Amino acid sequence: MTLEALEAVSPIDGRYWEEVRELAAYSSERALIQTRFEIEARYLIGLSGVGLIRPLTDQEQETLRKLGPEMSLDQVRRVKEIEAETRHDVKSMERTFREMVAGTSLEDLTEMIHFGLTSDDVNNLAYRLMLNRARKEVITPTLNQLIEEIAERAEEYRDIPMLARTHGQPAVPTTLGKEMAITAVRLKRQARKLAEIKLTGKLNGAVGNYNAQTLAAPEVDWMEFSQTFVTSLGLEPNLFTTQINPYDDMVELFQAFQEVNGILLGFDQDLWRYISDKWLVQELKAGEVGSSTMPQKVNPISFENSEGNITIANGLWEAMGRKLLVSRLQRDLSDTTVIRNVGVALAHGLLAYRHTLAGLRRTSPNLEKISQDLNHDWSVLTEGVQTVLRRAGVKDSYRLVASLSQGQEIGPEDWINWVNGLPVDQSVKEELLKLSPKDYLGRARELTDLALKEIRSS
């Protein structure tokens, strides 16, 4: 089965393939088949360890450990050929396994392949192994790269005063660095949570009671065996299951991805607005076209692309979480259709991280425009003024300042007359006259430093 990118139904396998292709090692159909083989092969080694099959030589154990990871494409295709006949993916894997050991020193173990197992004993472990590996090898490094880039910008822009907006309206000054630091801290905290979520595994038969194993080999402590085996895969054993291992752990991870993506979505939208306001400017790329009809355009397409991919990713995470928590009785098959889309959700998230990173790397602050907009209206200082008046004992100072400033614009030249008209002592006026938007920053710089310290300490 071959795929031409221009004929792919999904843009993940077409337009965006080159940007996400490393996920194929962890979420493709080939990866799933190879991981199933890996589990079945390691299971045979485990059976040998408890004396249920003969001792395996070192060479045989090494052969089994390599069986899944080193499967050829032709061997994987053979599984699909058999599946076309059986219409059962795990059974086709088992039959292919039997073919692969035929004529080898392992041939005598043929009947112990898949001994006492149900399909989900293999699948629940395979999907979690693949998800764990994708998280560790692809997603987390990319996310950390993005966080570090944002943190570097926070440090670089630490001392750039900038107008903050609430409800889209001028509020009070902040710094560009501090606003970057907020996103970096939020993402880092969530990335830490993402890395700490433990996935589970089960190996307990058709409805979770070890029925067949106990009947066929009562001398083996199957609960202890399954816990040891699952732990060896880097997963936490779950003894309490139906035929399926409940997806509670995976849904928790999906929700963590949603939170990461939600944080990034807000960041994308803020940077988009900063570009729109000309506070950030984008580096020109030779030969790049911003519009098919407007030659002057340099569009913030990286942030828009990220926003779109986040929307798709979070839609998939939410849908999978809603579906996978529910299974009819001891199991139904609807979960298998859904869980196959984990790689798609990961890929859209990965695209978002990379496009935000690309967009960030081509932006720089327009210091002149940032300063111009910050100093346009000094009424952004009135929060501080009414607070100082409260301290000075002026009655109902908020209403007083509001009556003099609400809906008004106060220019730099008007500031002196405005302050001198306030009903306060001259000493208070002198304190306020020293104030300017670029200086009214509170502890923004110190907060940026603290944020960077937290990010880099973790």
Image (tube, rainbow, N blue to C red):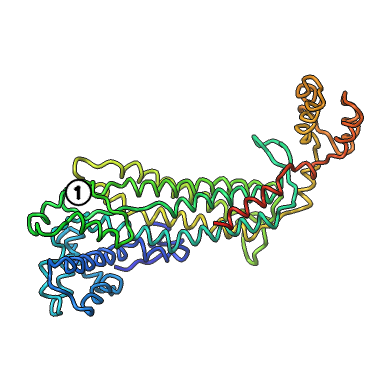
Left/right of residue 228 with respect to residue 143 in the rendered view: left
| Residue under numbered circle 1 | 243
x and y percentages locating residue 44 in the rendered image = 18, 67
> In this rendering, is residue 267 above or below 149?
above
Q: How many marks?
A: 1
Left/right of residue 80 with respect to residue 185 in the rendered view: left
> In this rendering, is residue 31 above or below 313?
below
x and y percentages locating residue 46 in the rendered image = 20, 66
Left/right of residue 233 with respect to residue 48 in the rendered view: right
Q: For residue 388, which quarter of the picture?
A: top right
Q: For residue 394, which quarter of the picture?
A: top right
Element at label 1: loop
Work out which quarter of the rendered image holds the C terminus and state it.
Answer: bottom right
x and y percentages locating residue 406 in the rendered image = 76, 27
**Name of the residue lying farthest toward the top:** 395
x and y percentages locating residue 420 in the rendered image = 91, 29
> In this rendering, is residue 273 above or below 5?
above
Residue closest to the eye, 260 or 73? 260
Tell me what residue is drawn at x 51 percent, y 54 percent.
352
Q: For residue 134, which quarter of the picture?
A: bottom left
**Name of the residue lying farthest toward the left:** 215
The amino acid at mark 1 is Gln
Tell me what residue is drawn at x 77 percent, y 33 percent.
384
Left/right of residue 344 with respect to residue 202 in the rendered view: right
